[in-house]
Image (cartoon, rainbow, N blue to C red):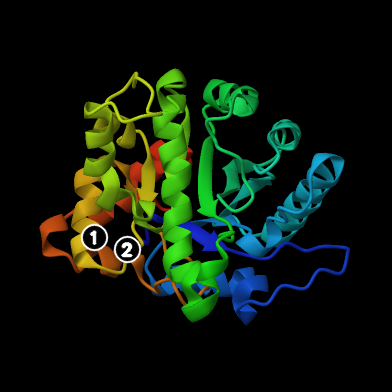
Amino acid sequence: MSAGVDVHTHLAPVLDRVYTVDGPPDLADPDRLESHLDAASLAGAIVSVPPPYYRQDLTNDDGVEWAAAVNTGLATRLAGHSRLRGLAFLPLHDPAAALRAYQATADGDWVGVVAGAGGRCPSLADPAYEPLWQALDADGRALMLHPAQSPDYRLADFYLHNLLGNPVETAVAAAQLVFGNVLARHPALRVILVHGGGVVPALAGRWARGVETTRPGVPEQELPVRDALRRFWVDSLTHDATMARAMVEVFGADKVLLGSDWPFPMGTPDPTAALNSCPALDGVAAKAATTNATDAFGWPGAGI
């Protein structure tokens, strides 16, 4: 029997308003997602809406209403598909709206929440986020941070908004949570970073050195940087064996999850095979798909 969970997949929500998103044809087809699971010998998938639905231009009541529509639409898309479980969207770019949207998901059948990292998002160390961190800490619900569109105009060429901007936006969000002592203050806060943690593994030593040498603007850390980084979970989508090893060394083998980014071309059709292609990581893929997924999301998926 197939076992294991792909934690990084996407589907478009069903919306009762006109909103056009360019994306792969399979983005609206949960049956095709289940076919992907069968081909990858996996039992279940955790599903979120892709970044074009983050709508960081909407704030206050507009942002809350949009999140409600998106979440209702994703729930509709997933209805009747027991192998697929959803992450509710939060408009994280507006701290007050994000909290209200989170409170509205309390009674939903969600395994966690997803939000856009970076883009128009303020610093996640801003005190305005504290009520949200407190709520997530108290509830023990997982928060997946997925990069939003980078605001850097220099990335317009060569598809760099994705090839460079996305992993950097993830690292910016992670750095704010680490250096802002957010993870230290909230020990039950479960944060998942996609794309192998972006460029965080390449920067971990530099961040630690910045604390050791008391660089200007770096506050005293309640957790050593390397300990704080091991509070994150990360998906396995690195596209590179060297970075996969670095990911495991920085975050720990118990914090790695399988992620494909289905159905987007920058993903992988078989996340287990991609992780197993690195001989130094023998056994990590099996744990990533099963026990690690259960620890991160509390949902093991069918067949585990």
Determine crowd level at label 1: few under 14, some 14-19, many 20+ residues with C-alpha closer than 10 A: some
- Residue 48 position, x and y percent, is 60, 56
> In the rendered image, which quarter contains the N terminus?
bottom left
Q: Position of residue 236 (x, y in %)?
A: 33, 57
Among all residues in the image, which is located at the extreme front?
216
Could you say which is closer to the camera, residue 114 or residue 291? 114
Distance, label 1 to label 2, CA atoms, is 6 Å
Q: In the structure shown, which secondary structural element does the residue marked by tag 1 occupy? A: helix
- Which amino acid, mark 1? Met
238 is higher (above) or lower (below) than 108: below
Q: Is residue 163 above or below residue 288?
A: below
- The reply to whether the C-beta atoms of the residues labelled 1 and 2 are less than 8 Å apart is yes
Name the residue: 45% across, 19% down: 185
Q: Would you say 150 lies left or right of 271 here?
A: right
**Residue 77 x/y as whole percent:** 71, 62
Is 76 displayed left or right of 278 in the figure? right
Q: Can you identify the residue that label 2 sits on?
A: 238
Left or right: where does residue 122 sit relative to residue 215? Answer: right
Percent across and percent down for residue 239 are 31, 69
Quadrant location of residue 109?
A: top right
Q: Amino acid at mark 2?
A: Thr
Kindly identify the residue that appears in the image at 54 percent across and 35 percent down.
Answer: 124
Asked whether the viewer can see residue 15, the reply is: yes
Report the front residue among 243 and 178.
178
| Residue 223 placement, left or right of 116 | left
Residue 44 visible, this angle: no
* Residue positioned most to the right: 17
Q: Earlier in the sequence, mark 1 or mark 2?
A: 2
Q: Residue at x 47, y 80 (%)?
A: 158
Q: Which residue is mark 1?
A: 243
Q: Residue at x 67, y 72 (%)?
A: 28
- Note whether 221 is above or below 232 in the view shown: above
